[in-house]
Amino acid sequence: MANAHTETGSGAGTASTDADRGTGVGTADAEGTAEIGVIGGSGFYSFLEDVTEVSVDTPYGKPSDSVFLGELGGRRVAFLPRHGRGHHLPPHRINYRANLWALRSMGVRQVLGPCAVGGLRPEFGPGTLLVPDQLVDRTRTRVQTYYDGEPRPDGTVPNVVHLGFADPYCPEGRKAALAAARGRDWEPVDGGTLVVVEGPRFSTRAESRWHAAMGWSVVGMTGHPEAVLARELGLCYTTMTLVTDLDAGAEAGEGVSHEEVLQVFAANVDRLRSVLFDAVARLPRTGSRDCACARALDGIDTGITLP
């Protein structure tokens, strides 16, 4: 595993730190700095003590924000605000490649990516926690591979690589998320399909009804290409979706509003955070990963050096 401070041209990226709680400014020795990554809002890390802010550069530009390092139950965790502080990045403008690369450069090998979604069935109403096992991509403009054969700024050229993606989420991560929710008396929906749309607008009624007619469960804007980029880096990726509203085709009112989404998310964020933190503790140790995610790149020549 390469250090996040690398020789020029290695493509791994660089990191520097600015300690949050007045502990000083210095250079991060990012080797093994964190083993688990969480991509979500600032509400998931802001109350932790001894949080270190790390600025990371990648061959794909800057990630959404700094990476915030903390400890949960003896596990080192790297938190990355998906939309940046202040929620200034809409879903289609998030630099997903930089985000996942930055986490891997910090030592992360397992990622939890909670997100807010709309329910596509009446039984998946606000407050439902669904842990998907499948994904449908309906985005249009997002770069979703590292292995496109295009030269990178450092002059290296990745090979064109085709990875299997039949099961997009880590089975071990899903087990951890489900067990964590049940341990908090929040019975989750085990399995289902997350359809990811481009955003930032919400779906029309016709789109929503079509999504439901296809048998899909929930709809969101940020679960892709996170999952596939994680797979391309050999990372385990699991999402936990919190239903904040019934999507336009599943209800008879005026349709979803941003205010409604924010209200329901705020009402459930403490519960979601508790489940998320318990899931972190239940994830397998990095050295004992025995899932297909960890072996995704076995025998494959990517043409580039991974951090």
Image (spheres, grey):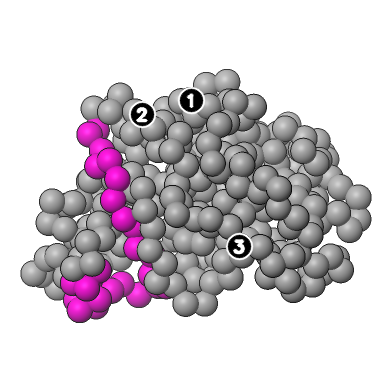
Question: Alpha-carbon distance for marks 3 and 2?
Answer: 33 Å
Q: What is the three-letter code of the residue carrying label 3? A: His
Question: Alpha-carbon distance for marks 1 and 2?
Answer: 9 Å
Magenta residues, start to end: 186-211
Q: Is residue 13 visible?
A: no
Which one is in front, 136 or 259? 136
Which one is in front, 301 or 32? 301
What residue do we see at 80% from left, 41% from top?
2
The answer to whether mark 3 and mark 2 are in CB contact below 8 A is no
Q: Which residue ends up furthest to the top in the rendered image?
A: 74
SS at badge 3: loop
The answer to whether mark 1 and mark 2 are in CB contact below 8 A is yes
- Is residue 160 left or right of 212 when viewed as pictured? right
Residue 180 lies, in percent from the top left, at: 36, 29
Judging by the rendered image, the residue that carries numbered circle 1 is 281
The answer to whether mark 1 and mark 3 are in CB contact below 8 A is no
What residue do we see at 34% from left, 28% from top?
179
Question: Alpha-carbon distance for marks 1 and 3?
Answer: 33 Å
